[in-house]
Amino acid sequence: MRHIFFWCGLLVLFSCKPEKQYHDARTELEAATGKLKEIVRFQEEMNASFRNPESSPLPDRYRKNFTGLDFYAPDTSYQVLANFTRTPEAIPFLMPSTTDEKSREVVYGIASFELHGKPHQLEIYHSLDLMDDEGYEDYLFLPFTDETNGLDTYGGGRYIDLTIPDGATILIDFNKAYNPYCVYNKKYSCPLVPRQNNLRTKVEAGVKAFDP
């Protein structure tokens, strides 16, 4: 009888454990695949918007031959879950732009995270000019610069759109970093990236520099 229990135990050990590992691996693969599909969908939607004459920032002379923006390859390592510290006492300020226009912004919170094994912080802004507009009540704005600027990406930095999170963390997907519209058309006024939002690392994700 003791031997029966012994062999039954071995059967449970060697039959269940690999199966669990298989399911864990499959779940992780499905999650990774889903994240990659989301990045690809973002790129496709941005390209479609740039082709559409009603939404494209491109002048007609560029849009008629437009085939697609130049993106870095999707990379889930640039999807970071940052600690998000609210800054309710922050004082509103005027953010300068590429023109004489200025937008009214307030630092809504500080995002703290690791990228490439090093800690980083970025300020995340809430636009006082947009907060009363329908659809923008929860909109947050993340402009940043990094060490790819002036090389692979636009020298003035890039933007990421976010929404106000429910808790104390916020997901930042650098694969969704895009260029200011003034890169494509000088008629646009684009906020300048604050000096404190410079990342001292390369962010090889998102859209690259525009070469018409």
Image (tube, rainbow, N blue to C red):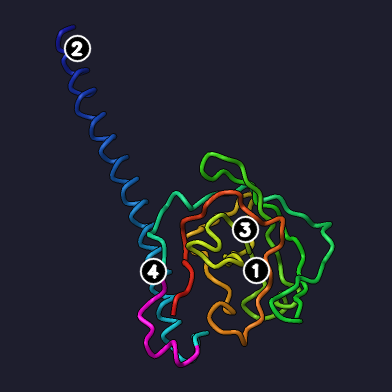
> For mark 4, does the 10 Å Cα neighbourhood hold few (<14), some (14 to 19), or many (20 or more) residues?
few
Q: CA distance from mark 1 to mark 3?
A: 9 Å
On screen, 15 above or below 133?
above
- x, y percentage for residue 50? 45, 82
Q: Is residue 8 left or right of residue 40?
A: left
Residue tagged 3: 165
- Give the mark nearest the N terminus, 3 or 2: 2
204 in magenta: no
Q: Are marks 1 and 3 in contact (CB under 8 Å)?
A: no
Q: CA distance from mark 4 to mark 1?
A: 22 Å
Q: Which SS class for mark 4?
A: helix
- x, y percentage for residue 201? 56, 49
Residue at the far front in the pictured view: 151
Residue tagged 1: 138
Q: CA distance from mark 3 to mark 4?
A: 22 Å
Q: Nearer the viewer, residue 102 or 109?
A: 102
- Give the mark nearest the N terminus, 4 or 1: 4
Tell me the quadrant of the picture where the C terminus can be found: bottom left
- x, y percentage for residue 103? 75, 76
**For the image shown, how many numbered marks are present on the structure?**
4
What number is the disc on residue 61?
Answer: none
On screen, 53 above or below 176?
below
Residue tagged 4: 41
Tell me the quadrant of the picture where the N terminus can be found: top left
The amino acid at mark 4 is Arg
Residue at the far top in the pictured view: 2
Question: Which image quadrant is residue 162 in?
Answer: bottom right
- Give the mark nearest the N terminus, 2 or 1: 2
The amino acid at mark 2 is Phe
For the magenta stretch, what is the residue range? Answer: 59-70
